[in-house]
Amino acid sequence: MGVDVQDLGVAPVPVVRYQISSLGLAGGTHVRKSPYDPELIDVKFFDGRGIECAPDREKAVERLFFTEDFYRAPTEETGLLTFPHAGTDRYRDGLLKSVDADLVRRAGLRMVLDYAFGSASSIFPGVLGALGVDVISLNAYLDERRISKTAEEFQR
């Protein structure tokens, strides 16, 4: 039998983890271009609590995938593919409820934040703005060509 899939689109790892746990899902995955090597794709697996699976469980999944030793459901047995909306809004609201927003506002925080062309740029400006943090944002847009850095770039 197939599985139901909720496609969150472009979302940072914390949003995916929050969605898994808050919606009571069995688990989830996050696929991204590696920030450390432009030639690699990272696939992260999470349990039903949104916690990253242990390396031995990840290896077991990889082994099943590469040996192609898994059930292929016929079309009529595949699950549903849905695209839930408001996932980032749900995460933002949950995050804001978990912090003392008044305390953060009174602190008068100011920062420079480099989003490194990643998906966090889709959520955190709104979170920090709601908390009254004065932010100078750098690279706050998605650019898959610039998301990975070489070892030399990380050293700078």
Image: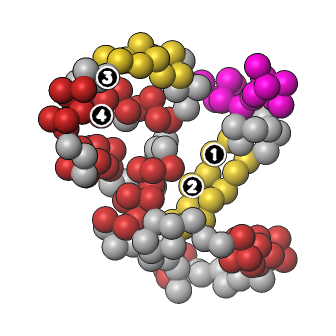
Judge depth for marks 3 and 4 and give the one in front. 3
Q: Residue at x 83, y 31 (%)?
A: 151
Q: What's the CA distance linking mark 3 and mark 4?
A: 13 Å
Mark 2, residue position? 30
What secondary structure is marked by label 1? strand
- Residue 137 as seen in the image, left or right of residue 58: left
Judge depth for marks 1 and 4 and give the one in front. 4
Going by the numbered disc 2, the residue's amino acid type is His
Q: Give the total of numbered labels.
A: 4
- Extent of the magenta region: 142-156
**Magenta residues, dominant SS class:** loop
Mark 1, residue position? 32
Label number found at residue 109:
3
- Who is closer to the viewer here, 86 or 101? 101
Q: Are marks 2 and 1 in contact (CB under 8 Å)?
A: yes
- Asked if 17 appears above or below 72 in the picture, the reply is above
Q: Which badge, 1 or 3, comes first in the chain's sequence?
A: 1
Q: Position of residue 141 (x, y in %)?
A: 50, 22
Q: Position of residue 24 (x, y in %)?
A: 34, 73
- Asked if 36 appears above or below 16 in the picture, the reply is above
Q: What's the CA distance linking mark 3 and mark 2?
A: 31 Å
- Asked if 5 appears above or below 69 in the picture, the reply is above
Can residue 79 be seen here? The reply is no
